[in-house]
Image: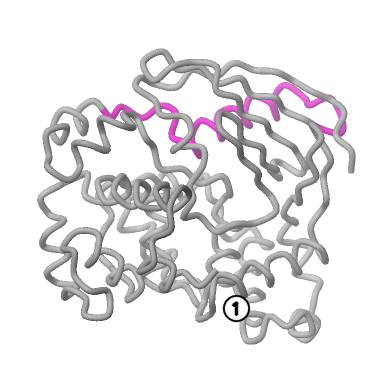
Amino acid sequence: MKLKRVKEIELIPTSPFAFDPTFHKPDHFPSSDTAWEQGTRWQTMLWQGECLGLKFENKGTTQQPQINLHIFSERSLPKNILDSLIIEIRYRYDLDSDLSDFIKNFKNDKQLGPIIKKWPGLRPMSPQGLYEFLVIGIMLQNCTVKRSVSMTQTLFEKYGTLLEFDRKKLYCYWEPKVLEKISEEELRRLKIGYRAKSLKRINTPFSNCEIDELELRKKTKKEQREILLSLYGVGPATVGYILFEIFKHYDELSHISPWEQKIYSKLFFNQDPEKPVAVEKLLKYFERYGEYKQLAVHYLWEDLWWKRKNEKIPWLEKLIRL
């Protein structure tokens, strides 16, 4: 699908704002619905039935941020769709967050301070919605990142839509109702294994409109957690990621996976990842950051993965297996 209609909009985030480390997360699952180069991000987005191409350009500074957004579509978008899209983009990229209290409290922290100084205004973000995030989570279960990327690409090629815009070709996710018509057996033939069952079970409540992400945002964190855990195959680790990245709970850090335990041990305590620090000790350590504990970990975590873009980190490579 070639997207020839273009609408340009200026977005002003709250200040300070760090564009590149907000709009590009080197630790995020690499997939063919996004592309990035310094100062620019491209992505696809399925919004209210429209397959869209988005291009974000950094046109401001840290203290006076400005983002130029180009929206590519097949047809001219009605005002109600365009207005709701902008609201959604501001939410997903956390453009309206006030981080002044966080910066004030931790700018002199021994570990966190230097990263805040380097990237004031770094935000968590999720370019995908809840449904897409859960699909990624299923593909990441019990296998290497390389294998997960391959399986997701297969799903894109089979059920997604290839969009061409701004000299880019990127895949757009499918509507949940598309997979509802597909049997588990057909999904298994795509060599995604037992994940076929998980994908079908996760897909149904979205296809039947039993799960509404916008309504979930209005609920308490406790209610959100309970609803998410009721979904088939969704465990505490996935819920933790969702509560932070999708629903913007900066204090959500109640579970640490074995993989994260190894990385946190090296990152925060310089401990051999194969002899990791106890989870209980890690959780207690992060309490020093209070209502911002997951945001603080996010800053340190992102800094590590950005370093990996420019230099080889042998101990980390062993854990990634991309």
- 141 to the left or right of 278: right
Quadrant where the image shows the N terminus:
top right
Q: Position of residue 159 (x, y in %)?
A: 80, 63
Q: Is residue 152 magenta?
A: no
Classify residue 81 as left or right of residue 159. left
Q: Quadrant of residue 196?
A: bottom right
The correct choice, above or below, for 71 with respect to 143 in the image is above
**Residue 79 drawn at (x, y percent):** 72, 21
| Chain part drawn in magenta | 73-99
Residue at 50%, 72% in the rendered image: 321
The answer to whether residue 225 is above or below residue 306 is: below
Q: Is 131 or 262 nearer to us in this picture?
A: 262
Residue at 75% from the left image edge and 20% from the top image edge: 7
| Residue situated in front as seen by the camera: 227 or 64 | 64
The residue under the point 70% across, 30% down is: 81
Q: Amino acid at mark 1?
A: Ser
The image quarter containing residue 70 is top right
Q: Is residue 82 magenta?
A: yes
Q: Which residue is mark 1?
A: 198
Q: Is residue 54 above or below residue 76?
A: below
